[in-house]
Amino acid sequence: SKAPSLTLNNGVEMPQLGFGVWQVPDDEAEKAVGTAIQAGYRSIDTAAIYENETGTGKAIAASGVARDELFVTTKLWNSEQGFDSTLRAFDDSLAKLGLDYVDLYLIHWPLPSKDAYVDTYRAFEKIYADGRARAIGVSNFLPEHLERLIGETSVVPAVNQIELHPQLQQEASRAFHAQHGIATEAWSPLGQGKGLLEVPTVVAVARKHGKTPAQAVLRWHLQTGNVVIPKSVTPSRIEENLDVFDFELDADDLAAFAALDEGKRLGPDPATFDFGA
Ligand code: NAD
């Protein structure tokens, strides 16, 4: 792997930079994941709702890379929360991926209005105990949801995957995670490639290091301690996003990035989002 690893709270190693496949149709995902593994990515982030676990699995099988050198994450969709439905949904994801275990299984959203994430997580604990997920965790959980989960279950989530980029730096969540040994994984790390990559500060820091804005942003994540999973279907960008281990942001750069936080969400608010519930 070209990316260094972080050690999760159960001792499992997770590459700090992986490849995300949200909004990539199944056949295109097969191609993109193949390109990514070829380029040196060893971690892939998919989800049942992305409807590309099949293509992702095909690319993994065709890659020629040993299963134990890859780190595969998938997520439980909202409609399947609950103990029994989670066990069924997990079987379905494994079958689509063509795998007998995943490296990380995440509850996609907390759905506080459905009030089922504790029962759902108990099914995750069974999956973990059975060795079918090497680590279990959550996504889009606010500190209050994590607090309750930790209080009512026995396995502290290894990861919380949340929206996080320089314009939404998530100080409170990151502090809570650090306090509880939970790794922070950043989704939409490039701000979905929209305005963030044109922000003058980002452009200037990138230019100073002879790198691209996307690379400067990814470097900020890595030095902040986040796991990142940038997405692209363009081979040159897939390579570019992994080529971030030959330079370092300095204290001035980090201070400039710190000033970009606007608490600006691109995605839904986890406190109220209940799509598919
Ligand atoms: P991202 O921040 O990774 O941005 C991706 C977009 O940025 C691309 O579609 C492209 O338009 C642009 N881009 C990529 N590389 C570039 C480069 N080098 N130069 C210029 N532009 C570039 O956004 P994302 O796809 O939303 O997030 C990444 C991954 O996070 C997803 O694929 C998915 O795996 C995960 N995710 C999870 C959740 C969740 O609820 N858990 C939600 C959203 C995304």
Image: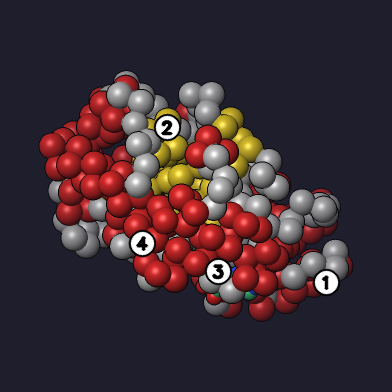
Q: Position of residue 118 (x, y in %)?
A: 22, 34
The answer to whether the residue labelled 1 contacts the one labelled 3, judged by CB atoms less than 8 Å apart, is no
The answer to whether the beta carbon of the residue marked 3 is less than 8 Å from any atom of ligand 1 is yes
Q: Is residue 65 left or right of residue 25?
A: right
Q: Amino acid at mark 1?
A: Arg
Residue 135: numbered disc: 2
- Closer to us: 9 or 135: 135
Looking at the image, which residue is at 74% across and 56% down?
Answer: 244
Calculate the distance from the C-alpha at mark 1 to the C-alpha at mark 3: 22 Å
40 up-or-down from 88: above or below: below
Q: How is the image coloured?
A: secondary structure
The answer to whether the residue labelled 1 contacts the one labelled 2, judged by CB atoms less than 8 Å apart, is no
Q: Is residue 49 visible?
A: yes
- Closer to us: 258 or 244: 244
Query: Reading the chain from its start, which is encountered first: label 4 or label 1?
Result: 4
Q: Is residue 270 visible?
A: no
- Closer to us: 25 or 162: 25
Depth-wise, is mark 4 or mark 1 nearer the camera?
4
Q: Quarter holding the N terminus? A: top right
Depth-wise, is mark 4 or mark 2 nearer the camera?
4
Q: Position of residue 265 (x, y in %)?
A: 45, 65
Q: Secondary structure at mark 1?
A: helix
Q: Amino acid at mark 4?
A: Asn
Q: Amino acid at mark 2?
A: Ala
Calculate the distance from the C-alpha at mark 4 to the C-alpha at mark 1: 36 Å
Residue 207: numbered disc: 1
Q: Amino acid at mark 3?
A: Ser
Query: Reading the chain from its start, which is encountered first: label 4 or label 2?
Result: 4
Depth-wise, is mark 1 or mark 2 nearer the camera?
2
